[in-house]
Image: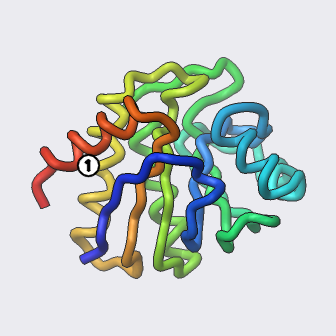
Amino acid sequence: MASIEVYQGDITKVEADALVNAANNRFWMGGGVAGALKQAGGPEIEAEAVKQGPVPIGEAVATGAGRLKAKYVIHAAVMGQDLQTDATRIREATRNSLRRAEALGVKSLALPALGTGVGGFPMAECARIIIDEVRRHIAGRTGLERVVFVLYDEPAYRVFRQELEKASF
């Protein structure tokens, strides 16, 4: 079974085969996780992603990772242009990100808290949803060996750490 970790820090510095981007469905990379990935990895990440949009909210697409240490960025469309999200969208975007990771054959995947920044979704509910989806995914056949939840600040890190400890594997 894949290992699951919680890490506090900058997702652009994490060594993983693929990094998940909390994206809008047109894949414009402005602020938050998307802005950080674009700044560290280069504008080619956004250019490649935009060519694949728009997609239905909840979908995910993969691009190269530019100058990042990762091989890929998986763009999880958790919101549309209204910048609103909900539990269903976050669950679907997480599920589709995991599917893209499998299709790419990645062994390690780093995920941020989807929809909690610009989308304003509650951190604790996000943690429950994402951890549940990852737990379900790795309980089946998977090529993933390591999943890392990457949270930028201490409060978010604590919420994910607590939710992970509560989750039954």
The answer, for residue 49, to whether it is visible in the render is: no
Please report the residue visible at 10 percent of the width from the left and 54 percent of the height from the top.
168
The quadrant of the picture occupied by the C terminus is: bottom left
Q: Which residue is mark 1?
A: 132
The answer, for residue 166, to whether it is visible in the render is: yes
Q: Is residue 95 left or right of residue 137?
A: right
The x, y position of residue 130, in whole percent, is: 35, 45
Q: Helix or strand or loop: what does disc 1 sit on? A: helix
The x, y position of residue 24, in whole percent, is: 67, 35
The x, y position of residue 121, in whole percent, is: 44, 23
Residue 34's image quarter?
top right
Relative to 46, residue 62 above or below: below
Q: How many marks?
A: 1
Please report the residue visible at 38 percent of the width from the left and 29 percent of the height from the top.
155
- Observer-nearest residue: 126 or 89? 126
For badge 1, the amino acid type reads Asp
The quadrant of the picture occupied by the N terminus is: bottom left
Q: Is residue 9 left or right of residue 34?
A: left
Within-10-Å neighbours for mark 1: few <14, some 14–19, many 20+: some
Relative to 17, residue 29 above or below: above
The x, y position of residue 65, in whole percent, is: 74, 65
Relative to 15, residue 43 above or below: above
Please report the residue visible at 52 percent of the width from the left and 77 percent of the height from the top.
106
Please report the residue visible at 47 percent of the width from the left and 72 percent of the height from the top.
108
